[in-house]
Image (cartoon, grey):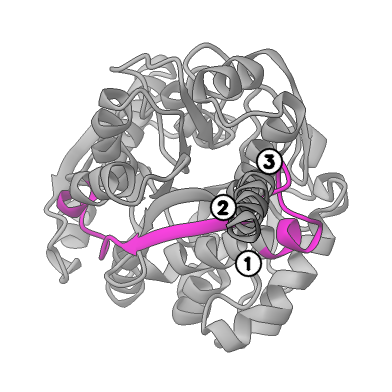
Amino acid sequence: MRKIWCALLAAALFAVIDAPVARAAEPIKIGFSMELTGPFAVVGKTGLLAFKIWEEEVNAEGGLLGRPVKLVYYDDQSNPSLVPGIYTKLLDIDNVDLLISSYGTNLVVPAMPVAIAHNRLFFGLFALAANEQFHYPKYFSMLPFGPEPVKTFAEGWFDLAAAQSPKPKTVAIVATDAEFQHKAAESARQHAKARGIDIVYDRAYPPSTVDFTPIVRSVQAARPDIVYISSYPSDTVGILRSVGELGLETKLLGGGLAGLQAAAIKMQLGEAANGVVNVDLWEPVLPMQFPGVMDFIKKYQAKAPAEGVDLLGYFLPPFAYCELQILGEAIAATKTLDNDKLAEYMHSHPFHTIEGDIAFGPDGEWTEARPIWVQYHDIKGHDVEQFRGAKTVTILAPPQYKTGEMIYPYAEARK
């Protein structure tokens, strides 16, 4: 009998000793949806690869708080209507510790009410002013458009337009009928009005549009001096191909063509991208080679071919990695997963990241705006090597990142 009691006591002691170890081994779960299929997958899958690189690095160094990290994610199929259900499942069934988002405003905004209802910290990836209606204190944005993102979005493009001689007098505004593009178009209207440029065409097209020829013909009929376009990646390809086929006559074209920043989209377009002046976020020029970013790019490019994604990774990937870099730093500094404490820390401390120093304002936007405006040129064919580095792109603004002058008008830049 005594032997049995001793054995039971030993087992109980081992259970007590082992319990904290077992709990410590439980992974920190980070949940999100991502466009792995559908029209936005060409960009979304690059973000997933960046997340996986961070996960691999952190776990190789022992994880966070002595625990491994684990990504828990589902394909939202580029469909905003699927997002609320995915995030409800992540929280109520998967019991994730932290929430991040899919790519883009149209997929981030539908997740906001779920995060708010569960009182959870939420990080939006490339979402334009997603928090402007909610003012949710635990939302943070990974998009460098500063405290007034809608105002900033088209500002640099219209600054460049207004600096030309003679100054353009008219503009056409073309946008997808969706959340992000509505905000981008509103930014364009504000800046056109402020600079005395008359709007002669202003229409949104359905997201289901596949033939852009009628839209380009309508724009041409309005005879605008400049054309501002806000689109998502698949639309960008269709619009620019139609522009090239119809020979749209305008002095400046571009603005908010999403996806054009990615090598995969430029490879599809080839010469059709030449001359476009567009918003961009990062290029591998010396002034933008923040500490660690080129090491990340090398890791990404080594993995990209096997993953079947954009081969260069200059658009979304550095920012996707940066987002988790910030979360990891906040967890390490606070030594907690408490969402309230993490949010408080993230609002009150700057972060040193592969995208430079970042601090967050009251609505979770960056305290400093840092987009760039670029022009694509000298693209020949569809080979990816011409997009490596900055051989076929010139940074026009802001001054601290500028690498050259704009070729104007558009017809001249197309040569």
Could you tell me how far apart the alpha carbons at marks 3 and 2 are, in whole angstroms?
Answer: 17 Å
Tell me if I can see residue 252 in this picture. no
Residue 264 x %, y %: 51, 75
- Say above or below: 25 vs 166: below
> What residue sits right under mark 3 in the picture?
328
Residue 172 x %, y %: 28, 41
188 relative position to 363: left or right: left
* Pointer 3 with pointer 2, Cβ within 8 A: no
Magenta-tinted stretch: 56-83
Residue drawn at (49%, 18%) of the image: 148
Tell me if I can see residue 323 in this picture. yes
Residue 363 x %, y %: 47, 16
Could you tell me how far apart the alpha carbons at marks 1 and 3 are, in whole angstroms?
Answer: 22 Å
> What residue sits right under mark 2 in the picture?
26
Q: Quadrant of residue 351?
A: top right
> What residue sits right under mark 1 in the picture?
313
Tell which of 392 and 252 is nearer to you: 392
Nearer to us: label 3 or label 2: 2
- Say above or below: 31 vs 150: below
Nearer to us: label 1 or label 3: 3
Residue drawn at (65%, 60%) of the image: 3
238 relative position to 138: left or right: left
- Say above or below: 222 vs 166: below
